[in-house]
Amino acid sequence: MMKLLSVVGARPNFMKIGPIIDALKGLPEVEHCLVHSGQHYDELLSGNFFADLGLPKPDVNLQAGSGSHAVQTAEIMKRIEPVLLDYKPQMVLVVGDVNSTIAAALTAVKLGIGVAHIEAGLRSFDMTMPEEINRKLTDAISSLLFVTEQSGVENLKHEGVPAEKVFLVGNVMIDCLLRHRELAAGSPILDQLGMRQKNGSGCRPYGVLTLHRPSNVDDPKILQGILEAVSALSVELPVFFPVHPRTRKNIENFGLLRYLASATEGGRGIVPLDPLGYLDFLSLNDRARIVLTDSGGVQEETTVLGVPCLTLRENTERPATVEHGSNQVVGVDSDRILAAAQSILRKPAPPLQRPPLWDGQAAPRIVAILREHLQRRDLA
Ligand code: UD1
Ligand code: UDP
């Protein structure tokens, strides 16, 4: 029997665990428990993704909720420990770089349970990012490290992680995208936003913006600079902005609502939307002329969709999206963002290229390695 327990908590975790759950299906020797930490709890950041992705209801919801980093991480640790003691998994699977990832990994390893980290090895080399701390700590205590791109393998090697723990397997988030792209094409979002051409011949050009990194949205000057740049861009084409709750709160508190178009402006300016479900967001990105973002996952998805992406940060932990993909890291200077965006609009979209192994088969590779590892351990 292979007894596994996976932990999810925040929006980008759900699309990463989906393909793993699919790859485990139909294996009679596998028993799997899905734990939701409750880090994200709104329907728009959590529940809708279970529906869109056809994920099973979590076996356990820890309902840890929001809080400071210490409070949230500690709360998840406190609440997951009895679950691990009771379920006794042979291995805990964690994904990505959120507080739920490190909280679950640290609790498991202290109980003597092995941890497999999916999306290991990525580094922004910016320790002011909470995610960078989570990544480094999780990698340091994991026994299997599943890596999405070559840079991750090299980062782990430099950190002294033994090569036999490290597996370059591709990208589960891209597995999820490739599996849902066709379904997403049936989303009504483009009609709802008035972007579909009346004669059915395609779409009007538009952009997409997402922002939620604390370094961008918790600083009033930086947030204002970004909104100024995108507002200037939105004179040329409407820019749809599904707004993360952290960002919405700050736009209101910092008095920046004037940068957002009102509902009566008919798809002009920066058009704020509620956070979108996975299929609507995928459909919107797939046909976008340009995406501006500080999201990690969106940099990867636009690479595979071949949509030009401007990353509004000073660095990326996902350099493959720049080397192989359509991503440019432009920083947060207002003039630079606008100039880079205008230059994209004047050129044809770049030729489509994918990083090696981003082929939709990462999850089956991970599951095959997990089975072999656990079988070998049983025999030892
Ligand atoms: C978290 C992750 C980040 C990830 C992002 C994905 C950490 C440190 N950060 O950031 O890496 O990119 O999720 O979206 O783990 N809130 C709601 N409803 C919710 C959840 C949160 O309104 O369901 C609000 C609360 O005011 C909360 C704030 O958003 O304080 C921030 O939530 P939190 O989970 O702490 O961090 P995110 O910014 O979402
Ligand atoms: N996403 C979504 N709806 C949105 C914004 C993002 O479905 O309104 C998806 C996006 O396609 C990707 C994931 O959420 O799969 C990325 O999550 P997020 O940007 O919150 O976190 P990050 O990747 O930066 O950690």
Image (tube, rainbow, N blue to C red):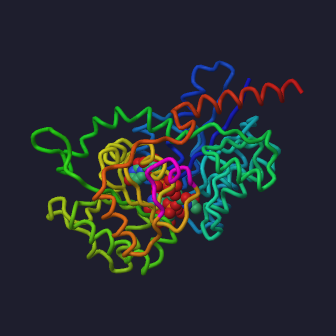
For residue 327, above or below residue 213: above
Residue 44 can be seen in this image: no
**Residue at (23, 52) in percent of width and height:** 205
Residue 39 can be seen in this image: yes
- Going by the picture, which residue comes out furthest to the left? 199
Nearer to us in this view, 337 or 297: 337
Placement of the C terminus among the 4 image quadrants = top right
Expressed as whole percent of the image width and height from the top left, the position of residue 375 reads: 79, 25
Find the magenta span and give its range: 318-329
Does residue 317 appear left or right of residue 45 in this picture? right
**Residue at (65, 59) in percent of width and height:** 75
The quarter holding residue 228 reads bottom left
Residue 69 magenta-drawn? no
Nearer to us in this view, 353 or 174: 353
For residue 185, above or below residue 79: above
Residue 328 magenta-drawn? yes
Q: Count all numbered tags in the image, as a single digit.
A: 0
The quarter holding residue 233 reads bottom left
For residue 285, above or below residue 24: below
Does residue 252 appear left or right of residue 115 in this picture? left
Expressed as whole percent of the image width and height from the top left, the position of residue 20 reads: 58, 33
Expressed as whole percent of the image width and height from the top left, the position of residue 246 reads: 44, 66
- Going by the picture, which residue comes out furthest to the right? 380
**Residue at (54, 47) in percent of width and height:** 13
Expressed as whole percent of the image width and height from the top left, the position of residue 364 reads: 60, 28
Does residue 43 appear left or right of residue 377 in this picture? left
**Residue at (51, 47) in percent of width and height:** 324
Placement of the N terminus among the 4 image quadrants = top right
